[in-house]
Image (tube, helix red, strand yellow):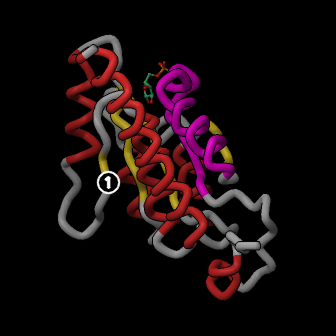
Amino acid sequence: ELDLYAPLAPVSGSGLSSRQPLVGIIMGSDSDLPVMIPAARILDRFEIPYELTIVSAHRTPNRMSEYALSAASKGLRVIIAGAGGAAHLPGMVAAMTSLPVVGVPVKGSSLDGVDSLHSIVQMPRGIPVATVAINNGMNAGLLAIRILAVGIPGFLLRMDGYVRDQADEVMCKAKRLEE
Ligand code: RP5
């Protein structure tokens, strides 16, 4: 049987258990939850352990620093960070960890989420954030899985299956329309 976690052992060197969260999902407010839950659901579907919590760049800056600075040593491999408005959370977290950070621009009550998109995507040279579309928590989850899959063949196989299923679904719909 394929050991999905085997490639991680040499990296962590600290007895990574199979339920050790590999992805950290954080968001600036509980009001971001409806956008971020699809990231968690897709990780559930792939049976990838994650943790999910609220970390605000502006309201809890010390908590944000602690989260970012300890993320790698506690075994996380990717961080998904969602925020709306002046969305500094993904960029600030990326500034304080070498882990890949996926940013989710959350659409607030004004400016259609473009404020958040620009805040997250316009990172300065040297500190990248992989930005997904406005409110697209699901793609953030999928991107996190693809990042993990680079080092974990079992995840890559599951992603191949997911992509195939998606294509099959489109083909079924196309056939039904053509009938
Ligand atoms: C941001 O401000 C959060 O990420 C959220 O998208 C937005 C509004 O937060 P609440 O006022 O709803 O808590 O920091």
- Magenta stretch in the rendered image: 23-47
In the rendered image, residue 44, in percent from the top left (x then y), is placed at 66, 42
> Is 33 inside the magenta-drawn segment?
yes
Q: Nearer the viewer, residue 110 or 40?
A: 40
Vertically, is 64 above or below 33?
Answer: below
Q: Is residue 145 left or right of residue 51?
A: left
Quarter of the image where one finds residue 100 = bottom left
Local secondary structure at mark 1: strand
> Where does the image place residue 133, in percent across and percent down from the top left?
28, 35
Q: Farthest residue to the front: give it.
A: 179
Q: Disc 1 designates what residue?
A: 130
Of 66 and 21, nearer the camera is 21
Name the residue rendered at 72%, 85% in the picture: 13
Q: How many tags in the picture?
A: 1
The crowding category of the residue bearing disc 1, from other C-alpha atoms within 10 Å (few below 14, some 14 to 19, many at least 20), is some
Asked if the stretch drawn in magenta spans residue 26, the answer is: yes
The residue lying at 34 percent from left, 22 percent from top is: 173
Query: Which of the pair 143/61 is nearer the observer?
Result: 143
Q: Give the quarter of the image for residue 125.
A: bottom left
Q: Position of residue 76 (x, y in %)?
A: 62, 63
